Image: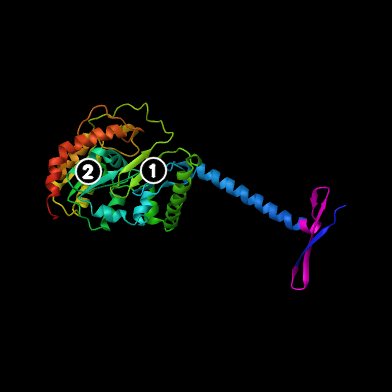
Amino acid sequence: MARSNYIRAEHGKDRVTNVEVAVRDGNSKVDRNARFLVTPVLYISILVGAVLVASTYKLRIDGIFACPADGYTPDRYLAYCAAARYGDYEHGAFWFGLEPSVLGIAARADAMFLGDSRTNFGFSTDSTARWFSAASARYYLLGFTYGENVSFTGELLRRSSLQARIYIIAVEFFERRETIPAKDVMQNPGSYFRYEVKRFWQRLHQTICGTVPAICRDRTAVYRSRQTGSYSLNLGRWTGGADNPPVFYDREIDQEKIKGYVASGREFLSRLPVSRDCIILTTIPTIRKNAYSYSPSVDTASAVANILGLSFVAPHVDVLRTYDGSHLDRPSAERWSDAFLRVAGPQMQECLGKPLA
């Protein structure tokens, strides 16, 4: 029979407990006191492991790990992840200055684009980048998801000393409606901490899923450029727009919208430090009945521009398609933005050479 060995733990001169480790016939045994100590440790270990597994599962289903991490670059951050417990980041990033450089970069742009996510997707193209590169000018797309409008973006711009010499504004930007993320960041004191946590998770997301992509899932993700505000889209598994019909240019005239947009537009435009001939209104083609937020018809938007005494450019390009029933897909956005810049380009060039008013 093998000899028993004793390990004694002592505190000062008083023995605290004995743990007998007996080795007999190749089996280890511990006494009752040892079991009393080991059982809680084992229980806690199992509990912690279960919590970690559950947390990881939730992150992959409802959190940031539900989205792919392939869009990060030194210039791009995650603006939106289509997961229930992540969703919007860009509103908080701008409002709380979590991406410290972006609002300053936007304020220093020579050309400013204002609207919602349809505007951003419509001009997040190589055509736009090439035009401004050729003009040796900087541009910034200051559109936001959730159908954002002047109620939020206008307040952002109040904080900045704008240097833009030309403004391209989607008419629906003049909507005055409080969106869910705008209300959250502007009115909820607890939202700052939550957006800080979202920013922290992006670092882990980029590191972990950038190293092992299989850890993350394939929900839709929108990445945003710090330098231009342009969007980069990863649709993931989304295929909902595959059967969408081409955009439709209807002729509806909405007098109530015209009245509201004109009043809102006059108030906002009075604060811009440029002459009226350096403000161009537009509207982005979409399938209006499917659009996530209200989109005016070309005739409604044109009427607003006419009353405000502003240029209106919205080229009719055939067979444009959306990826989701609302936003132009990338090939369509390339064609439409190229057509827009061909028409508006001469006016924009002239304004870029003018000093601020």
Report x, y in % for residue 300. Answer: 22, 37
- The amino acid type, in three-letter code, at marker 2 is Lys
Q: Tell me if residue 109 comes above or below residue 14 in the rendering.
A: above
Q: Tell me if residue 185 comes above or below residue 246 in the rendering.
A: below
Q: Disc 1 marks which residue?
A: 71
Q: What residue span does the magenta drawing correspond to?
A: 10-34
Location of the C terminus (image quadrant): bottom left
- The amino acid type, in three-letter code, at marker 1 is Gly
User: 40 or 20, which is in the foreground?
Assistant: 20
Q: What SS does tag 1 mark? A: loop
Q: Tell me if residue 317 comes above or below residue 5 in the rendering.
A: above
Q: Disc 2 marks which residue?
A: 259
Report x, y in % for residue 154. Answer: 27, 52
Mark 2 and mark 1 residues within 8 Å of each other at the beta carbon:
no
Q: Is residue 164 left or right of residue 91?
A: left
Main SS of the magenta segment?
strand
Residue placed farthest to the front in the image? 2
Residue found at x 37% / y 28%: 242
Spatial separation of the CA atoms under disc 2 and disc 1:
41 Å
Find residue 305 and report its image quarter.
top left
Q: Earlier in the sequence, mark 2 or mark 1?
A: 1
Answer yes or no: is residue 155 visible.
Answer: no
Is residue 32 magenta-colored? yes
